């Protein structure tokens, strides 16, 4: 049988706080993502979502447990994983085209092959005409499109996304979700997506892992059995969508400090 694209087993990560107290950010987390799956992680603020994603990227070293990509143990960042963060991480002195091309710096491809790939991704993210624009000439949504193209251009096996649309307004966020669904439909690579936003998780995912309050453990896993392709406007008013949303909101509220005894779904009903 093929290995999962990403396999996280019994992962625990601890930090030392400023006053030298030990903080367990992630505790005994295990999850697998198959090569064409879209998986999200949600949970209360500070529960260790970003830490888990950074560990998958090879940016955090676990005290316990293993992370494997295609069966190989992760020890540092690598070209098999693309990363998109919430804050804009483009080089301000490079244009759209140059920012994307920069990702191929270490690639053995020829210059014409690299140029063809960059042009392909510029078209995929809908930024034709903005090839020569600098990041400060682009809107927030456009910058995140460039960040997505930059992560995809070296054709990673997994895309790791940490609240990539968290800083965008509602309208732009929705069009970015549609764009990401289109891109994912064309690429069908594994995606691990961290979000605070329950609706966003349901819209995008095949599966959602809900994390507990710190120390972050996997509280539960939910399969999202909504048909694809997903048209956002119809989807968001469908009874199945609303039922996933209520269930997830209840699960997260149980973990938050503001938990009240009456389940949220009863209040909405
Ligand atoms: N480098 C670090 N040093 C010390 N503590 C850290 C470090 N990185 C994260 N933490 C702590 O680990 C815990 C988990 O942080 P993390 O950023 O992973 O949570 P999160 O779920 O992504 O939060 P949010 O949803 O608010 O972004 C927090 O208590 C945080 O303060």
Image (cartoon, rainbow, N blue to C red):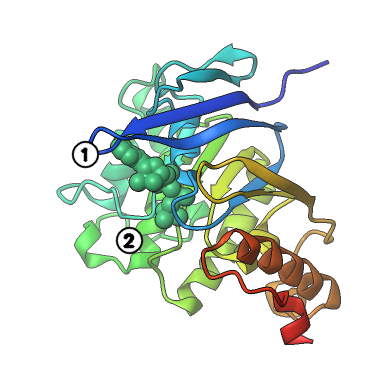
User: Can residue 197 be seen here?
Assistant: yes
The image position of residue 221, as x and y in percent, is 75, 47
Q: Quadrant of residue 15?
A: top left
Which corner quadrant of the image does residue 243 belong to?
Answer: bottom right
Question: Residue pushed farthest left?
Answer: 93
Q: Looking at this view, is 177 or 245 the one in front?
A: 245
Q: Quadrant of the C terminus?
A: bottom right
Residue at the image point whose x is 57% and y is 63% from the top: 177
Disc number for residue 18: 1
Residue 58's mark?
none
Label 2 secondary element: loop
Crowdedness near tag 1: few (<14), some (14–19) or many (≥20) residues, C-alpha within 10 Å: few
Please report the residue visible at 53 percent of the width from the left and 30 percent of the height from the top: 156
Q: Which residue is mark 2?
A: 130
For marks 2 and 1, the one nearer the N-term is 1
Q: Nearer the viewer, residue 106 or 33?
A: 33
Q: CA distance from mark 2 to mark 1?
A: 44 Å
The quadrant in which the N terminus is found is top right
């Amino acid at each position: 049988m093929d290995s999962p694209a990403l396999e996280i087993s019994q992962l625990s990560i601890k930090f030392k706080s400023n006053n030298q107290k030990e903080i367990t950010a992630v505790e005994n987390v295990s999850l697998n993502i198959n090569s064409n799956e879209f998986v999200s992680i949600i949970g209360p603020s500070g529960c260790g979502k970003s830490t888990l994603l950074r560990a998958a990227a090879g940016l955090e070293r676990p005290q316990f447990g293993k992370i494997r990509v295609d069966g190989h143990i992760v020890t540092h960042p690598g070209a098999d994983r693309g990363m998109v963060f919430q804050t804009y991480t483009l080089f301000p002195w490079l244009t759209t085209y140059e920012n994307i091309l920069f990702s191929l710096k270490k690639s053995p491809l020829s210059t014409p092959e690299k140029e063809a790939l960059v042009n392909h991704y510029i078209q995929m993210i809908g930024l034709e005409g903005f090839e020569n624009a600098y990041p400060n000439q682009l809107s927030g949504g456009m910058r995140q499109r460039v960040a997505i193209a930059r992560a995809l251009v070296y054709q990673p096996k997994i895309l790791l996304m940490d609240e990539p649309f968290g800083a965008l307004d509602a309208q732009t966020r929705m069009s970015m979700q549609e764009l990401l669904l289109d891109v994912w439909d064309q690429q069908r690579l594994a995606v691990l997506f961290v979000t605070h936003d329950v609706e966003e998780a349901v819209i995008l995912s095949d599966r959602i892992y809900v994390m507990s309050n710190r120390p972050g453990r996997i509280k539960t896993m939910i399969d999202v059995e909504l048909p694809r392709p997903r048209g956002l406007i119809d989807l968001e008013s469908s009874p199945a969508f609303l039922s996933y949303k209520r269930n997830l909101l209840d699960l997260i509220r149980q973990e938050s400090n503001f938990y009240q005894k009456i389940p949220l779904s009863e209040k909405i009903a």
